[in-house]
Image (cartoon, rainbow, N blue to C red):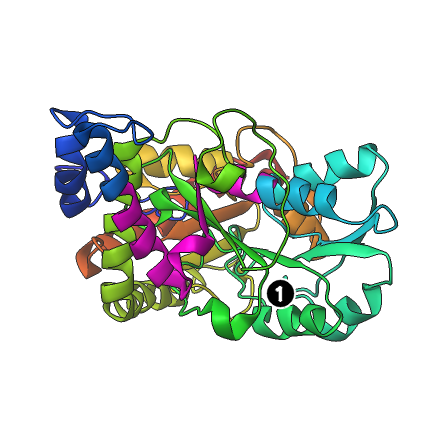
Amino acid sequence: MNSPVYLDNAATTPLDERVFDAMLPYLRGARGNPSSLHGAGADAREAIEAARGHVAAMVGASPEEIILTSGGTEADNLALFGLARSAPPDKCHAVVSKVEHAAVREAAKRLEADGFEITWLGVDEYGMVDAREFSASLRDDTAFAAVMWANNEVGTIQPTMELAGICAERSIPFHSDAVQAAGRVGMDVGESLVSTLALSAHKVYGPTGAGALYVREGVEVSPILFGGGQENGLRSGTENVAAIVGFGEAARLAREEMAERAAHEGELRDLIIAGATEVPGVRLNGHPERRLSNNVHLTVDGVEAESLVLMLDALGYAVGKGSACSSSGHKASPVLEAMGQSEAEAFSALRVSTGKENTLEEVEGFLGAFAGCIERLRELSPIQAS
């Protein structure tokens, strides 16, 4: 194999060459602090505002509602801590799903440790939140609710518009992590009624180190960073112009090419699901229909996912173990546990995620390697041998 086949696009996407070209002037000669009054500063500010407009357009927002951050994690943290701190003193309760990304889950745990009461909302076997249970969990003292648009591990797409609407009827702010969904799922914040929305550049073929938080006009969010008052006082710190410009270009391309990309990713995704589940003891996790166009999450009985990932990597195929944000520590995925899976099943979970640059030939090659690796690992497994 001449070069590795990259099938871990849910972890991060390769930087689009067009995005790199847009960033390059700001990595080389174009200088200037966007807060400076001179011409170089004004040029940097103009580039940032143009990028902000593209990010806003990707989700149907106005540019004034986009707060630029260092990534999705900061955006999620700003949303949760910002909504909690801006809530009235008698609002000290929140509803958070059990399948949230760690950026939301750990922020909610911190709030809980500081005295906030968190209702951890369960899901069904597909990782789906039930709207009736969600509605019943809201209270008069609920400061906010948080349910991600689409799950980063198993790919399940939540009924976000319905959940946001339930909150809107009760004037409760609703936050959604849309890091995986943006650029793959059509979204318009005017229709969905979400209060805040987290976004990230490197999931849409942009650079790492850039993200955004959509904050609906009229929603109060308190800052968690303090300093020079950039981003309307909600995110102080000198802006990373090159990364922001890259995010803007990536967002523009994602919006224009979304239908084509989703169709291509979805075709390859379905081929992988069909081929992989033909192998005995391999089953799909997440919703079979309401799932991201690029997500294939599998449980492989009798095989530890870490060993399978490493063996596939040695053969030239890069895939993920569960999720990139939870694979560094040897502990079961909270998402799979919430879906009712055992610890053994969770340790046998593999995530394969297609991208706009993948090909049919790469998928066919992967499926052959996948089946061969499973056969070999099961032969070596003491569990299988016994």
Q: Is residue 99 above or below residue 329?
A: below
Relative depth, front residue between 189 and 264: 189
Q: Secondary structure at mark 1?
A: loop
Residue tagged by mark 1? 126
Q: Amino acid at mark 1?
A: Tyr
Q: Which residues are magenta?
A: 48-77
Relative depth, front residue between 41 and 287: 41
Quadrant where the N terminus sits is top left
> Looking at the image, can residue 368 be seen?
no
* 274 left or right, relative to 20: right
Q: Is residue 237 above or below residue 372?
A: above
Q: Residue at x 35, y 61 (%)?
A: 58
Q: Residue at x 15, y 42 (%)?
A: 22
> Looking at the image, can residue 311 be seen?
yes
The x and y percentages for residue 29 are 11, 24
Q: Residue at x 60, y 39 (%)?
A: 77
The x and y percentages for residue 33 are 29, 26
Which of the 4 image quadrants contains residue 135? bottom right
